[in-house]
Amino acid sequence: MDHEHNDQESKSSQGLTRRGFLQTMGTGAVAAATSGAVAGIKKAQAETIVPESVIRVDLTINGLRHRLVVEARWTLLFVLREKLGLAATKVGCDRGECGACTVLMDGVPRYACQTLAVEAQGFEITTSEGLMDAGKLGPVQQAFVEHDAFQCGYCTPGQVMAMEGLLRLNPTPKPEEVRLGMSGNLCRCGAYEHIFRAAGRAAELRRGKRGG
Amino acid sequence: MADQPQNSYYLEGIPVPETPKPGETPPPWKKTRIVGQPVPRVDAYERVSGTAVYPADVSLPGMIYGAVLRCPHAHARVIKVDTSRAARMPGVRALIGPDTPGANPVWTWASYSGLKVASKLFDAICRFEGDAVAAVAADTPYQAWDAARAVTVDYEPLPFISDEHQALNPGAPAIHPTGNNVEPPKVYERGDVAKGFTEAEVTLEESYRTECEIHVPLEPHGCVANWEGDRLTLWESTQGVYAVQSRVAEILGLPFSKVRVIGTYMGGGFGSKLQPGKYTIAAILLARLAGRPVKMTLTREETYLSVGNRPPAEMKLKAGVRKDGTLTAMDFSCLATGGAYPADGTSLVDWLVKDLYLCPNVRSTLTDVYINAGPARPFRAPGHPQGAWALEQMMDALAAAIGMDPVDFRVKNVPLFSQSRPGQPPYTSTGLKACLEEGAKAFGWKEARARIAATPKSPRRRGVGVAAGMWAAGSGRPPSTVMVKLFADGSVNLNMGASDLGTGTKTIMALVLAEELGVRPDLIQIESADTGTTQYASPSGGSKTVPTEAPAVRAAAVSVKQQLMEIAAKDLKTAVADLDFQAGIIVSRSDPSKKLRLQDLPGLKQAGVAVGIGYRGPNPADKIVNPFAAQFCEVEVDLYTGEVKIFRFLAAQDSGRVMNRLTYDNQVFGGITMGVGLAMTEARILDGRHTGKMVNRSGYDYKVPTSLDIPLNQVSLPIELEDPLANTVGAKGLGEPVTVPTAAVLANAIFHATGVRVTSTPMSPVQLCRLFATLKKEG
């Protein structure tokens, strides 16, 4: 069975037969594509930005001022990731369900996907990049390393920001306060137990205790 | 590490394992010095800082954004797709639909069991809500979605089936011309089941159901496609770059060498990212058309509909037992659905019934049907948690019926061989008995039951539960190739194609190298998961990555040692047989004053590097390598509100050697968490009456466990048996077996607390209140 199951895995890669479509697709698709035989697209007509929809914003992120032009509907998350290259803040759901995009705004955890860039003006925005000191991990990040408080790592910068926000508000949280404070951030890998353990260590490191 | 003197690369003078002669298999490790220790990950910095670049994070010059327009109907014919308005929308760079010349390749839906149904990327019939209809790429994702919404599609809605029970009804709409049976029911039988039931002193029969579960990895499925001339580079969030490469190449008719797939980091898969999706092909075609790199990250909603699930399972189990605890017969059946295309709807659901406990007479009948819903994909131990839900609740009920302790009853029926495989081969090791016995001891099983029995009944009731499990795979297997490169200063580079899904693969491989060479794990650079630059590996799935890759890494390390000894023999003017490889140093046995540090070997300096290639050797013939588990928990159930508090949970896992205690425990807790989701909160709900659509396609309506939902106290108890036959490192898979018994453990604990047998997931307060309402008012 083991063998059978394992074969299935490798078959997944070979799942398709080469019949028929090799002739129709293959370089054929590429040729058709480059010849421009695409439904209704004329590149000359394409505009990248509709002028009346844009607005100037002034964002303070990790202590730096960014002045840029955004569409009113752009989220802070989109601007961070796709316009400013601050990709530590992750997109998980883009609708306030998972917490992967958690940032601090004036020290308080907020979902960047639920915050328009225009709304974020006037706040001190902190992302996971902002917790680093010249490439050195911040105390919460260091605690996550030591206690292996992550698996795939995709939700991790958001978890780190949620914990940072929690500890700024409450430097010595009780276990139930940690559970509650972290409950807005999903971890599908299920690293919660280690995240809880990291919280105690992070609190310690923030108080300046090193080692151990 | 610039401030470190060179010799601190190695723990000098400490013996490393004996170096076997070329061609010899390295003997099992005895005591390990580094392997098995709790070691933080080699890529922890990248993952916690946010500098790890996941496919969703890739940003390339000129990159634009893709979106897939999906069918809003459960079943519909696509009459006409009008893209003319969408194509004029601002920012649109490319748009493809069923009529775009050359951009609608054949897409074959295939099950892992080998069934295939040919379709198109944008097919004329959409058999599930969320199938692809058209795709667009624009300068921003906002513009891409504006354009996708501006595509006008004429659909002819068709009759649909949302409930697998109705799929085989006379007159049910046929989802495929062949009907709604994916294949004829699969029947397995051993012994004489009818006779077995006549020998039973107690026979019980029960129906069970587990609901459809969605993977919900935190990084949505997605990719970035970039063409450079006729060469394609694809960053795909995947568990297997080589699997994606071959499938993409075949669909597009490209030589494999023109398709480079990179998946160095990926944000969770759990089986749903073993393969590319239609979105992958769409992104590649859009990138070609636009002449720009295209990033395609699915929306969360799309991931609920179109990229896999754990199929729902409707199960019946009849079991007979003698009063001394001997199982005499089991008859199991399962009706399940992998959705609208062949997708292994019933795969491995009966495995535990067939193999977990000694039983001479077993029959299983599996019926896989089509419904109009998204195709399933493998989901962490396919079939197993479903089967455990039925079998382990039945074992509990049988134990109660014959007045035996549930742990003792299971221990009595532990097999030492695989009953359902041809020839009934023995396991290389089975820790099932030890998992049950040592787990029960560590949990305080008997004491907890005595304490609860002595507690006066109140509306809040405590209960404890046990369940066991195994995983039908987890052995690892060839092929795997890895390459270890030792630089002239003694530091090391490891090249492997496998993906580290977050299970800690890379770190474990660094520990293997450290163990074998004596080099510090943090001085090992690892390249992984890139078809252009790393060695071949099958996808990371089936809990086989560590038992597949670690022996290959060990073999490569041994090869490096052998080469270094050859070099040293020349440099020290002695025979290889006279040399001893210690950590960081090679010494003459006959004249210990003759020795050289690795970085001082003139031959190595001249060569520049020593390169060792390691291959995964074959598995033992006629023996089976499987991991086992037993889990225990204590709950408190509120009879008024239906709320369940999980006080503590203990997982005793036999996965062979513990490779890294830190990531091991993390995997164990993660498996429990996922099992809690299946048991307590997760269920795909389709509106079978009016639309056939999924109604809970969001994180609020489909609830994945949060930090508030997991057990208050979790204990990982490795049952570490030596398994020298399994492979050269003695490890078995862990990631999947840890989630197999979990849901059943909770159901058994709730039964113990309340006397109510909950046979369907999720055990939500709503369901529990309904069941408790039938209880007599007491206490």
Image (cartoon, grey):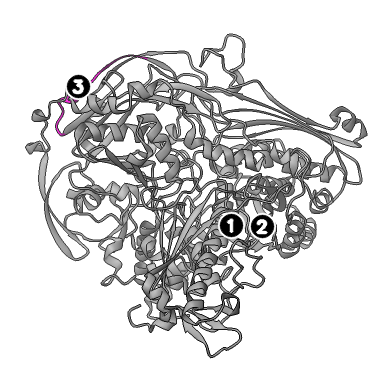
Nearer-the-camera pick, B508 or A116: B508
Q: Magenta stretch containing residue B313, yes or no?
A: no
SS class of the residue under badge 3? loop
Q: Nearer the viewer, residue A29 or B258?
A: B258
**Number of other residues with Cα within 10 Å of mark 1, as a class: few under 14, some 14 to 19, many 20 or more:** many
Q: Of tags 3 and 2, which is closer to the observer? A: 3
Residue highlighted by disc 2: B653
Chain on which label 1 sits: B
Residue for point 26% across, 32% down:
B286
Q: Which residues are magenta?
A: B78-91
Apparent side of residue A63 relative to residue B389 in the rendered image (left or right)? left
Do callouts 1 and 3 mark residues in contact (Cβ within 8 Å)?
A: no
Task: Determine which residue is flagged by label 1.
Answer: B668
Q: Quadrant of the N terminus of chain B?
A: bottom left
Please provide percent x and percent y for residue B424.
78, 42
Q: Position of residue B486 (x, y in %)?
A: 43, 69
Residue A37's label in the rendered image is: 3
Q: What is the distance, in whole Å, between disc 3 and disc 2 at their CAs?
A: 58 Å
Task: Find out whether the residues at labels 2 and 1 contact each other: C-beta distance under 8 Å.
Answer: yes
Specify the quadrant of the image occupied by residue B330: top right
Amino acid type for the residue under numbered disc 2: Gln
**Residue visible at 11% across and 38% down?**
A49
Determine whether B309 is above or below B600 in the image: above
Lower position in the chain sequence, tag 2 or tag 1: 2
Q: Is residue B777 visible?
A: no
